[in-house]
Image (cartoon, rainbow, N blue to C red):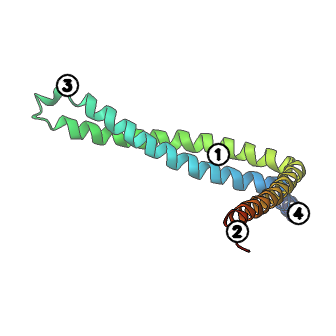
């Protein structure tokens, strides 16, 4: 019985691991968590250090100024951990949501990107034609104004 259960679980795990939507969601969530925790941690470190230093100003006269760097150190540590945790959580959820939504709408995104690329290429061709006609016009004015030949 145990072998049947393990075999069933292994087959289900293999089927789930091959699901493209799940793969994209997991990778997007991991990337979002990495970016979010890094940014949140940096922001928390700066804000926590600043607030800790300001909080250390009040007892600075009694502690001969040592409370300011200690407050900045403690505030920075708390801010770093809080910012990294909250930023990572928001990045995990947001990245997973964006990845899953983009995967579900990948054909529309692809067709929109192809359409935009065609418009850019058409505009580039139009601009090239206009530049050539302007160059021809200026060349004609310069040559015609000096009486020389091209």
Give 140 or 73, whichever is nearer the viewer: 140
Q: Residue at x 64, y 45 (%)?
A: 92
Residue occupied by mark 4? 11
Compute the Cα span from label 3 to label 1: 39 Å
| SS for dot 4 | helix
Residue occupied by mark 1? 92
The quarter of the picture where residue 58 lies is top left
Compute the Cα span from label 3 to label 4: 64 Å
Give 99 or 73, whichever is nearer the viewer: 99
Residue occupied by mark 2? 147
Which callout, 2 or 3, points at the residue further toward the start of the chain?
3
- Label 1 neighbour load within 10 Å: few <14, some 14-19, many 20+: many
Give 45 or 17, whichever is nearer the viewer: 45
Q: Is residue 4 left or right of residue 77?
A: right
Which callout, 3 or 4, points at the residue further toward the start of the chain?
4
Compute the Cα span from label 2 to label 3: 85 Å
Look at the image and tell me in which quarter the N terminus lies: bottom right
Give the x, y percent position of residue 59: 17, 27
Cβ atoms at labels 2 and 4 below 8 Å apart? no
Which callout, 2 or 4, points at the residue further toward the start of the chain?
4
Res. 78 visible in picture? no
| SS for dot 3 | helix
| SS for dot 1 | helix
| SS for dot 2 | loop
Give the x, y percent position of residue 47: 39, 36
Q: Which disc number belongs to residue 58? A: 3
Compute the Cα span from label 2 to label 1: 72 Å
Which callout, 3 or 1, points at the residue further toward the start of the chain?
3
Res. 44 visible in picture? yes
């Amino acid at each position: 019985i145990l072998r049947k259960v393990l075999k069933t679980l292994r087959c289900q795990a293999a089927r789930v691991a091959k699901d493209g939507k799940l793969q994209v969601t997991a990778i997007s969530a991991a990337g979002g968590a990495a970016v979010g925790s890094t940014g949140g941690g940096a922001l928390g470190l700066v804000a926590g250090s600043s607030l800790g230093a300001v909080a250390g100003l009040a007892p600075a006269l009694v502690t001969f100024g040592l409370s300011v760097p200690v407050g900045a150190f403690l505030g920075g540590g708390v801010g770093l951990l809080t910012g990294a945790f909250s930023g990572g959580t928001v990045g995990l959820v947001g990245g997973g949501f964006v990845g899953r939504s983009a995967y579900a709408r990948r054909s529309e995104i692809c067709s929109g990107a192809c359409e935009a690329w065609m418009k850019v290429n058409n505009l580039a061709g139009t601009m090239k034609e206009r530049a050539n006609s302007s160059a021809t016009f200026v060349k004609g004015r310069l040559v015609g104004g000096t009486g020389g030949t091209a």
